[in-house]
Amino acid sequence: MLELKYNTSSIEAGCDEAGRGCLAGPVVAAAVILPDNFSDELLNDSKQLAEKQREKLRLLIEEKALAWAVAFVDNHEIDRINILNASILAMHRALDQLSLCPQHIIVDGNRFKKYKDIPHLCIVKGDGKYMSIAAASILAKTYRDDYMKKLHVQFPVYNWQQNKGYPTQEHRNKIREFGTTDFHRMSFNLTEQQLRLPFEN
């Protein structure tokens, strides 16, 4: 069972992102403030859950949270400011949209930029330790997956409905075969380079 909060005496928001390692599509972040009486044994890091479990929890989180928000940073912004800055920007945008202002923020990972004058704490693998971060990971993941499934309809050859833009071998092969789209991250290594020695004269 995850812990509800790190700072038990404050209104605390948990933040997490999804899609950081993808070759295509946006990075998506969520911020969630849970009530003090929230409890659910299934709630966990989104990567540890099946798709149906995530969808079930998404509905529960949206219903029970005191406040929640999801924000996107697209692939063009990622290429312009890099994926780390884009991930943090997405979290800031999610925090901007909260209907309730948090007094403390906990963030999955080890890097974050100060948001307004609100104290924050980075927690490595926080999505497996604290409920609000786990809830944020589920919202970020499910909203991003839904977005990539819609893009798949436009670009079915890349199989984004299954790989969600992640660097599977199939995805890399399709980029080699069909080229890139306006949704690919051009600053990323989209195709693996073959290891070879130069020809000698």
Image: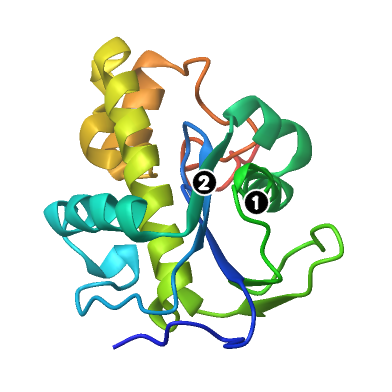
Please state the horizontal and vertical placement of residue 64, each as a whole percent of the image.
34, 59
Asked if marks 1 and 2 touch (Cβ < 8 Å), the reply is: yes
Of marks 1 and 2, which one's residue comes earlier in the chain?
2
> Can the viewer see residue 20 in this picture?
no
Q: What residue type is disc 1 on?
A: Leu
Figure quadrant of residue 110: bottom right
Q: Quadrant of residue 43?
A: bottom left
Residue 54 in view: yes
Which percent across, then down, holds residue 72? 56, 36
Q: Nearer the viewer, residue 123 or 80?
A: 123
**Vertical placement of 21 versus 107: above or below?**
above
Q: Kindly identify the residue that appears in the image at 32 percent across and 63 percent down.
A: 46
Which percent across, then down, holds residue 136?
A: 45, 59
| Quadrant location, the N terminus | bottom left
Classify 118 as above or below 23.
below
Determine the residue positioned at 77% across, 39% down.
81
Residue at x 50% of width, y 42% of height: 193
Q: Which residue is mark 2?
A: 69
